[in-house]
Amino acid sequence: MTPISDYELYNIINHPPPLWLVGIDISDKNLIAVDLQKSNLQYMIGIRTNFRDALLSNVDFSFADLSEAIFTEATIEYANFTKSHLNKAWFIGAQLIGSYFVGCSMQLTNFSCADLTKVHIIDSDMLRSWSAESDPAIFQQVNFINNNMSQCEFSGISFQQSLFRKIHVEKAVFRRSNFQYSTWENSYIIDSDFSHADFSHASLINTSFINTNLSSVDFSQAKIDNVDFSQAILYQTIMPDGSIISS
């Protein structure tokens, strides 16, 4: 599809939402602070599009290509990103509460300071996604199901009460993150760093932490069933019964 002109785009977005913009190509356009709430943007091409401060709640972005798009400080609550491409997108400070990311490509996506409370991330590739430790994202009560989270950089983040089911984590960093009351099922973690993380009251079932740094991790009052700690670093690690592994 041929990209629309700035004039055409101006005329479109000056109509009150919701708008029907299926398949539109707005790559490299500036949509700063635009109001597109409840609009249909399926199959949209928005490569490097700037949505800073935009109002995008309840928008349908399914099958859209939003690679390298900027969503900084945007409000995107309960949006649908099913099968969308979000590689290298920036969600810095965005409000993503309750949104759906199903079958997405999210490699190198920046979630610094974003609020992803009650988000659903399913069947997605989050390879090397990240959040700056100085401006951590919030991933509370998130459903992570059947995702690749390898090489992610998610230190100092709150994952409280989140579900991790069938997750693959390799060479990732989750230092000082909070996993209190989280649930891990049938997941595989290898060669990663979870040092100083808090897993107190968590439930870990059929999950492996192979060759993973678990030093100073707090597993107090956690439920651990068939968990493989082969070659894991367990130094000053607090176990479910309150005992501390000192060597």
Image (spheres, rainbow, N blue to C red):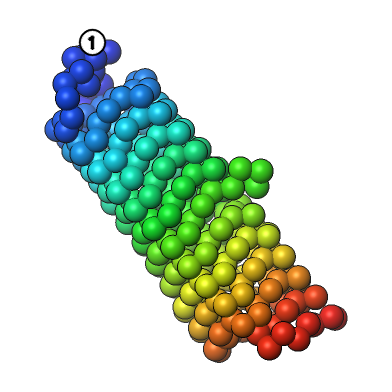
Q: Can you give x and y, in whole percent of width and height, for residue 106 in the image?
A: 44, 48
Residue 87 seen in render: yes
Task: Report the front residue among 225 and 238.
Answer: 238
Q: Is residue 221 left or right of residue 75?
A: right
Q: Can you give x and y, in whole percent of width and height, for residue 239 in the image?
A: 70, 83
Q: Quadrant of residue 43 in the image?
A: top left
Amino acid on which the number 1 mark rests in the picture: Tyr
Task: Report the front residue among 68 and 51.
Answer: 51
Q: Is residue 11 left or right of residue 172?
A: left
Residue 104 seen in render: no
Q: Can you give x and y, in whole percent of width and height, for residue 155 in the image?
A: 64, 54
Q: Can you give x and y, in whole percent of width and height, for residue 70 in the image?
A: 43, 31
In percent of the image, x 54 and y 43: which residue is there?
113
Q: Residue furthest top?
A: 7
Badge 1 density bin: few <14, some 14–19, many ≥20, Cα 10 Å = few
In percent of the image, x 52 and y 64: which residue is there?
160
Q: Is residue 123 left or right of residue 43?
A: right
What is the quadrant of the N terminus in the image?
A: top left
What is the quadrant of the C terminus in the image?
A: bottom right
- Residue 201 to residue 67: above or below: below
At mark 1, the secondary structure is: helix
Count of marks placed on residues: 1
- Residue 90 to residue 142: above or below: above
Q: Is residue 74 left or right of residue 218?
A: left
In percent of the image, x 55 and y 43: which residue is there?
112
Q: Which residue is mark 1?
A: 7
Q: Quadrant of residue 23 in the image?
A: top left
In percent of the image, x 59 and y 55: which residue is there?
157
